[in-house]
Amino acid sequence: MTDNEPSTEAPDRGPDSPSQDAGLWPGDTGTLLDRSRRALLELIRGPYLSRARSPLNWAALRADEGAIRSRLNDLFLELVVDADAEFAFVRAVAGDDNTFPRAVRTQSLTFLDTVMLLTLRQRLVAEDRDGRVIVGQDEVYESLQVYRTPDRDERDFAKRLNSSWNSMVNKLRVLHPVGESGAEGPARAEISPVVRMLVDSDRVRALGAAYGALAGVHESADGADGDADGEADADGAGDDASDETTADKDDS
């Protein structure tokens, strides 16, 4: 593992690590502190836990990481922590023959969701050396116009782009609004560092090649039918993300 890779190894848990001596309710046999349990729950709900959005839960995770990691392992889940970017997520354990059960559900993305996610990741990788990476809704939409099929009118395509943009903001939480938001969502947004982990490099290359070829077909087609509605099997945080997430569960 390089210095820049997120950690999947459990830190040593000393005798002074937090634990719950008294139950939170009658009959409670749990041993984690209240806040550590909330951090664990946010991780399982997905798509990720970050210090920026949930500072108390993040602090609890860092203080009680070994015990939380152990609870997740009991559910066939692996904890991935990026201490530098200050976020963490869970992913399903990858067995040799895929025999482990899946405790969290994979986030299903539409075609436009996927190409927008790839576009945001590309921008982040190219520009994050300068600090925060902020993009405009209009520039992202313009870059995705190559995927509009000849049978799709501009108004309908714009509606689908708005849906994908708002999914990035509210469901996957890889865009954080900057300034005021209108009826079609925030006009500008900061790309979250976690977007790097939502699609790994191998899948980026595979999807990028496939969608790049598809964009070329769309540009050269003259009235040919195209399909921009198909769903891609892209994953949520790491390998998995719950589809029951909401945008606002900060330190719940």
Image (cartoon, rainbow, N blue to C red):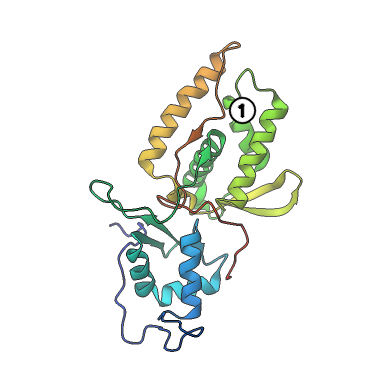
Tell which residue pokes out farthest to the top in this image: 222
Residue corresponding to mark 1: 145
- State whether residue 206 is above or below residue 189: above
- State whether residue 6 is above or below residue 160: below
Q: Nearer the viewer, residue 93 or 5?
A: 93
Q: How many marks?
A: 1
- State whether residue 93 is above or below residue 209: below
Identified at 52% across, 35% down, the residue is 115
Q: Regarding mark 1 in the picture, which secondary structure is present there? A: helix
- State whether residue 61 is above or below residue 198: below
Name the image quarter holding the C terminus.
Answer: bottom right
Name the image quarter holding the N terminus.
Answer: bottom left
Tell which residue pokes out farthest to the bottom in this image: 22
The x and y percentages for residue 194 are 48, 54
The quadrant holding residue 79 is bottom left
The x and y percentages for residue 135 are 62, 45
CA neighbours of label 1 inside 10 A, class few (<14), some (14 to 19), many (20+) = some
Tell which residue pokes out farthest to the front in this image: 27
The x and y percentages for residue 188 are 67, 48
Q: Is residue 140 left or right of residue 78?
A: right
- Indicate the amino acid at tag 1: Gln
Q: In this orientation, does residue 135 appear?
A: no
Q: Which of 16 and 84 is in front in this view?
A: 16
The quadrant holding residue 93 is bottom left
The x and y percentages for residue 12 are 29, 76
Q: In this orientation, does residue 180 appear?
A: yes
The quadrant holding residue 183 is top right
Identified at 46% across, 46% down, the residue is 125
Identified at 30% across, 65% down, the residue is 9
Q: In this view, does 117 lie to the left or right of 170?
A: left
Identified at 57% across, 16% down, the residue is 225
Tell which residue pokes out farthest to the right in this image: 183
